Amino acid sequence: MVSRWIMPALDRLAFTCFVAVLGAIVFLYGVAVGEYKCFPYTWLERTVHAVILSLEPNRPHHLTAAEYDFDGARVHDRDAISPGVTLITGYWPESDWAPGIRVIDVDGNVLHAWDVDPSRIWPDSPHDDHTAGTKNVRGNYVHGTYLFPNGDVLLNIEYLGLVRMNAGGEVVWKLPLRTHHSITRDEDGNFWVCGTKWLERRRADDRRRAEEYSLEVPVTEDFAVKVSPEGKVLREISLLDALHRSGQGELLGEPPLTGDILHTNDVEPLPTALADAFPAFNAGDLLISCREINTIFVLDPETERIKWLSRSGIQQHDPDFLPDGTIQVFDNRRPWYGGSRIFRIHPADGTIYVDYPHDPHTDFLTMAGGKAQRLPGGNLLITEARRGRVFEVDRDGRLVWEWVAPLYGDDLVPEVLEGTRYPLSPEQVTAWSQ
């Protein structure tokens, strides 16, 4: 009698425990998928993106709940603001939420605008991999840019291609490589950008390439790409080769690896003017950031070997060589680490100096994206990407200026991938339209 009652109860308890454990495993794996972009993140991202675009084709790529109770510019200390105009990449209601670029003055007035519709620049995808057709859509976005003095602008349409437009918004040339993230001009007038190729199962050469490093297709191979001002590819350096050639292949993790394994987001050459401040490096060495392995490193472009690396950030962006011999890093981090931060690291001994925020209770966070520009006089211009905000602080971390993207709907804000200050006057910018 007792056993007939106990055994079913134990069976129910065991089943309940099994369901609870299974639920916990599913939950934890879901967290891991979102955090580490493991399988099936890429497939889910493409599927969700396609569904959203089919329902709302003009919807910006990434929307989050608004953190700030205003939009446009706020001036907190006009005398402390570093001079110049600010270039911002984002989505704009006046163009029906198309991606584009604006140059604004200190009060937020738009001085010049470029609307960038990827579906018009490339009506047909120039790529033939499994993501073809998902990037030449209005919902894609402009990431890195470079503004020429005559009003031309060089821009990356993320993972679609590199485009040069004139001040009137006409395409001067376009390069159908899967370029993305930052654009940096070198001393010769050429540009370094990030490039990516998908290695896929249907191509024998891709399978052989992946097998060299025990990778599982589909998988990305990232490159540092040098491009002329006329749009000609001058150099491609495989970062996968560079890591293994330098004995750093273990940074990728345990094979088999698949998907977006590096997610390179910055390539910047060391200028001659700063080379003396970095005795271990040479002018022209490349400073590179790879988000997925939480690593920045300096690469000799001649030997294609790594000279130095650091893993002091978490999914970091936008490292920069500074005149004092340190490297500035936008450290995205996570809420449980206290939010994002801007720090400098000394390559010689690894010493870290946190430049922002000074107050550990400051609410500053972007889980992805981000940029920090060191301005003349020591101010910092910071792009808080996922919150749609660009702001400027002085050396003491005091807020002197900020700009927030316009609301999409009642309470959502689109991401802003870049805010960059240029030493131009408003009159110089408005002259481009005359």
Image (cartoon, grey):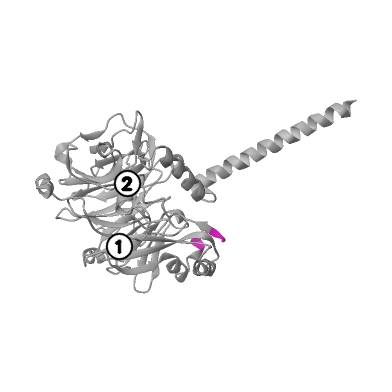
Question: Label 2 sits on what residue type?
Answer: Leu
Distance in Å between CA atoms under marks 1 and 2? 18 Å
Q: Which mark is residue 86?
A: none
Tell me what residue is drawn at x 58 percent, y 40 percent.
27
Note whether residue 121 is visible.
yes
> Does the segment drawn in magenta span residue 254?
yes
User: Upstream in the sequence, badge 1 or badge 2?
Assistant: 1
Residue ID for mark 2: 417
SS under mark 1: strand
Tell me the kind of residue under disc 1. Answer: Trp
- Can I make out residue 354 in this image? no
420 or 314, which lies in front? 420
Number of numbered discs:
2
Whether pointer 1 and pointer 2 mark residues with C-beta atoms closer than 8 Å, the reply is no
Question: Relative to residue 29, is residue 305 depicted above or below?
Answer: below
Q: Compared to 98, does 281 lie above or below?
A: below
- How far across and down, in percent of the image, does residue 130 sit? 47, 56
Residue drawn at x 35%, y 59% as measured from the top left: 194
